[in-house]
Structures are given as structure tokens and as C-alpha cells.
């Protein structure tokens, strides 16, 4: 069974027109009224707005595909995804206020089946990436832990490396963020710390990874805080980077380490927005006659894609860390 071509779904040149062949609900038209079809970012934001409107008004169909996302995760995951996508659009600042104003109007509609609202984070990409790294690791830490503790997994080092670098990033990021309102990512730092502290099996993970706690270089550690890690019995271990949080962010963002349910929300959003095509045209034709068959095909596609991503993650993590 062949796996989907990752680059096909991520390539901007292959993005399908959102809602192509469908008639938008009247509430979705507000995207065009408020944002218009302007150049230099306006057109992309309008398409994204219409795609989100389509998701909200067809959420029951989306949710019927069993992907393991709990109800309380849909809105935060979508908010993260939306703002991340907004930041990728050229000159987004010229239209971002109108974009979020349109989403506010759409969310007040009775047809918003998700009952979700969207907030303009109003932060630049550097700060957002820091928040995103901290947030995503908090969300996937349980899955990484399972991978490391899986007795059948003979290659745990990529996961161990990811834990070590995220712990190190946390300790660098907290230097200039010691109290609430002192930075834009204090909440993510606190959640990160609480997530690590609530798990009593950190020692087991350290044993599996052959790591030990070590003082963080140029960072003051508190006993109950997230520790820095290094290999046991190797005092001359070289750091992959200087103590530069921006450099670590680039490594962590470029490492493909998406797990369900975060992977699942990305797949759904690829399907319903300009970020990617749904499936190939032939597959759409094959599954259009039966709703049950449609569900089965999408589930099979997502299972295959998840396996593909997991395999790619291991290879890319190894390449990214060794290249650094």
C-alpha cells in the first residue's frame, strides 16, 4: 500500500481553490465583503476565511470521521493553525484586522456548529514560533513518552533527542520570562513546566534515553523546574548549537514530529482549506457514491499518512540534528 506524497500536499503550487464547485453559505460571503479580493495577501486571507467558514458550518461531517480529537481541542488547535497560516501570507498585516473581524461575524452565526471563536494573537513570527514550540511539545509529550517506553521500538534516540532539546529550549526561553505579563509566552512556559512535573516517570525516560540531569549552562536552575539533560558518562558531549533560543527554535520547527491528534487536525484542515487538496480527483470520484465508503477511505488515508509521517519524522529528526 503506497503512502501519499508529502510534498504534493504541502506544495503551494498544488493548492486547490477553496470550496471549488460548491456554493458558499451567505455568512461565508462576509469574507469577500470585508476582505475583498485584493492583491498582496488580501486574496489569500479571503480564501482562508471562506475555508474556515466552510469548516465551521460543516463541522458535523468533519467530526464524523473518527480521528481522536477531543471536543475541547478543536478550537485551540484551529486557532494555532490559523494564525500560523496567516503569518505565512505576504503583507498579511494590511488585512489581518479585517480577516479576524470577518471570522468574528461568522462565528456569531447560528450555523457555527463548532461554537468556536478566533483571536488575533497580534504577535510577530519570532514570538509566535516560541509559543508554538512550547505548546506543541506539551501536547505531544505523552505520545513521545509512549514511543520511548514501547519495548518494540528499537530506535528511541530521535525521541530522546527531541525531549532534550525541548527541555533546553524551555530553560533558555524562561530567562527573559520570569513572571506573568513579562513576555507573550509565559502561559506556555507554565504549562510546559506543569506538564513535566505532573509525570512521575521522568526518571524512567532518562533511563531509557541514557540521559542524566545536568545544570543548564548560563541558566539558573530551580530544583523542581524542568532540568537540562545530557548523555551519561560523556562529559565532553558537544552541544549541537550555541545557547541561542532562536537557533533551537529553527531546529525544533523544522523537525517533523507530528503526532495524532495534532496530525489529525492538520490533515482535516488540508482537506477543507487552501492549504492543500482534498484527495486526488479520481479518489474523490470513487468515494462520492457512498458516505460509508468515503469515511473508510479517509480513515485509511489518514492511517497511511500517519505511518508515513512517523517514518519521515525519524529520518528528518536525525538529519536535522546531525546537520546542526
Image (cartoon, rainbow, N blue to C red):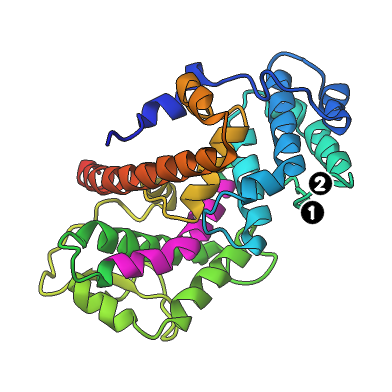
Estimate the x, y position of residue 40 in percent, counting from the top left.
68, 16
Quarter occupied by residue 33: top right
Q: Between residue 30 and residue 127, name the one nearer to us.
A: 30
Please give the range of residues in magenta: 127-147
Image quarter (top left, top right, bottom left or bottom right) of the N terminus: top left
Task: Using the image, tell me which numbered label, if any, was put on residue 205.
Answer: none
Q: Between residue 255 and residue 250, name the one nearer to us.
A: 255
Estimate the x, y position of residue 210 in percent, counting from the top left.
17, 73
- Near mark 1 (Cα within 10 A), the count class, few <14, some 14-19 or many ≥20, is some
Q: Between residue 64 and residue 216, name the one nearer to us.
A: 64
Residue sitting at x 81%, y 35%: 97
Residue sitting at x 46%, y 20%: 282
Quarter occupied by residue 4: top left
Quarter occupied by residue 131: bottom right
Q: Secondary structure beneath disc 2?
A: loop
Residue sitting at x 85%, y 38%: 101
Magenta-highlighted stretch: main secondary structure? helix
Estimate the x, y position of residue 111 in percent, counting from the top left.
84, 44
Task: Using the image, tell me which numbered label, if any, was put on residue 112.
Answer: 2
- The reply to whether the magenta stretch includes residue 141 is yes
Estimate the x, y position of residue 299 in percent, counting from the top left.
46, 46
| Residue that label 1 marks | 115
Q: Is residue 33 left or right of residue 322?
A: right
Q: Are marks 2 and 1 in contact (CB under 8 Å)?
A: yes
- The reply to whether the magenta stretch includes residue 261 is no
* Residue 85 versus residue 197 in the image, above or below: above
* Residue 268 versus residue 257 in the image, above or below: above
Amino acid at each position: 500500500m503506497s503512502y501519499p506524497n508529502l510534498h504534493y500536499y504541502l506544495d503551494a503550487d498544488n493548492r486547490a481553490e477553496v470550496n471549488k464547485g460548491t456554493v458558499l453559505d451567505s455568512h461565508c460571503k462576509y469574507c469577500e465583503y470585508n476582505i475583498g479580493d485584493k492583491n498582496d495577501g488580501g486574496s489569500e486571507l479571503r480564501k482562508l476565511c471562506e475555508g474556515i467558514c466552510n469548516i465551521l458550518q460543516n463541522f458535523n461531517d468533519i467530526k464524523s470521521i473518527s480521528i481522536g480529537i477531543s471536543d475541547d481541542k478543536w478550537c485551540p488547535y484551529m486557532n494555532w493553525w490559523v494564525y500560523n497560516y496567516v503569518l505565512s501570507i505576504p503583507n498579511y498585516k494590511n488585512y489581518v484586522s479585517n480577516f479576524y473581524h470577518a471570522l468574528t461575524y461568522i462565528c456569531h452565526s447560528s450555523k457555527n456548529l463548532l461554537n468556536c471563536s478566533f483571536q488575533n494573537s497580534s504577535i510577530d513570527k519570532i514570538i509566535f514560533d516560541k509559543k508554538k514550540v512550547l505548546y506543541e511539545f506539551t501536547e505531544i509529550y505523552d505520545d513521545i513518552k509512549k514511543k520511548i517506553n514501547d519495548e518494540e521500538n528499537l530506535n528511541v534516540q530521535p525521541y530522546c533527542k527531541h525531549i532534550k532539546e525541548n527541555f533546553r529550549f524551555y530553560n533558555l526561553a524562561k530567562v527573559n520570562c520570569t513572571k506573568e505579563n513579562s513576555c507573550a509566552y509565559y502561559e506556555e512556559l507554565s504549562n510546559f513546566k506543569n506538564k513535566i512535573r505532573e509525570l512521575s516517570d521522568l526518571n524512567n525516560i532518562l533511563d531509557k534515553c541514557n540521559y542524566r540531569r545536568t545544570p543548564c549552562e548560563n541558566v539558573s536552575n530551580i530544583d523542581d523546574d524542568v532540568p537540562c539533560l545530557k548523555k551519561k558518562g560523556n562529559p565532553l558531549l558537544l552541544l549541537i548549537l550555541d545557547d541561542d533560543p532562536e537557533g533551537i527554535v529553527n531546529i525544533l520547527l523544522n523537525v517533523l514530529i507530528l503526532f495524532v491528534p495534532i496530525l489529525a487536525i492538520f490533515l482535516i484542515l488540508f482537506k477543507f482549506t487552501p492549504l492543500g487538496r482534498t484527495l486526488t480527483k479520481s479518489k474523490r470520484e470513487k468515494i462520492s457514491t457512498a458516505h460509508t465508503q468515503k469515511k473508510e477511505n479517509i480513515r485509511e488515508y489518514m492511517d497511511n499518512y500517519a505511518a508515513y509521517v512517523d517514518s519521515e519524522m525519524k529520518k528528518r529528526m536525525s538529519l536535522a540534528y546531525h546537520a546542526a
